[in-house]
Image (cartoon, rainbow, N blue to C red):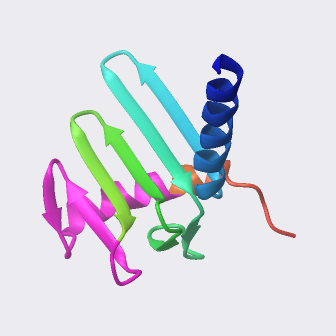
């Protein structure tokens, strides 16, 4: 019975991991009093200017924290991008929020594999 439970648990973990195609990346840097953390999972497609997200795969997300400001981007129900800035949901980013998004996107682009 114990072997059956272990097998079931192993299959469940493999199935859960397979449902989230793409990568799970966490990058943290801290110098003096500045902390930056980027976490993303799934496939994140960025524009050629590397300042905005074009698409996020289902169940994917981006979480970016920079010295007290936090941005979360996820795939919306209609396939668009939903944003949350410092705990507040928004559909229109102001210039400061767009700059925060651009910082996150540049980090994502830097760490994604290059396509030839």
Q: Residue at x 41, y 81 (%)?
A: 79
Residue 70 position, x and y percent, is 26, 45
Judge left or right: residue 10 versus residue 24. Answer: right
Q: Residue at x 61, y 27 (%)?
A: 5
Residue 41 position, x and y percent, is 53, 51
Residue 96 position, x and y percent, is 22, 60
Which residue is at the front of the view, 6 or 108? 6
Q: Residue at x 37, y 45 (%)?
A: 64
Which residue is at the front of the view, 32 or 104? 104
Membership of 29 in magenta stretch: no
Where 3 falls versus 11 (above or below)? above
Where 7 falls versus 115 (above or below)? above
Judge left or right: residue 96 versus residue 114. Answer: left
| Quadrant that contains the N terminus | top right
User: Where are the magenta residues, as a range?
Assistant: 76-105
Residue 34 position, x and y percent, is 33, 25
Where 33 falls versus 71 (above or below)? above
Judge left or right: residue 66 versus residue 89. Answer: right
Where 17 falls versus 106 (above or below)? above
Membership of 77 in magenta stretch: yes
């Amino acid at each position: 019975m114990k072997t059956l439970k272990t097998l079931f648990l192993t299959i469940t973990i493999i199935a859960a991991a397979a449902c989230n195609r793409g990568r799970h990346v966490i990058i943290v840097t801290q110098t003096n009093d500045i902390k930056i953390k980027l976490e993303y999972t799934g496939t994140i497609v960025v524009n050629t200017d590397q300042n905005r997200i074009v698409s996020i795969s289902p169940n994917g997300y981006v979480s970016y924290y920079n010295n007290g400001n936090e941005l979360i981007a996820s795939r919306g129900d209609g396939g668009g991008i939903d944003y949350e800035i410092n705990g507040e949901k928004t559909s229109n980013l102001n210039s400061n929020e767009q700059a925060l998004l651009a910082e996150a996107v540049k980090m994502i682009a830097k760490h994604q594999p290059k396509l030839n």
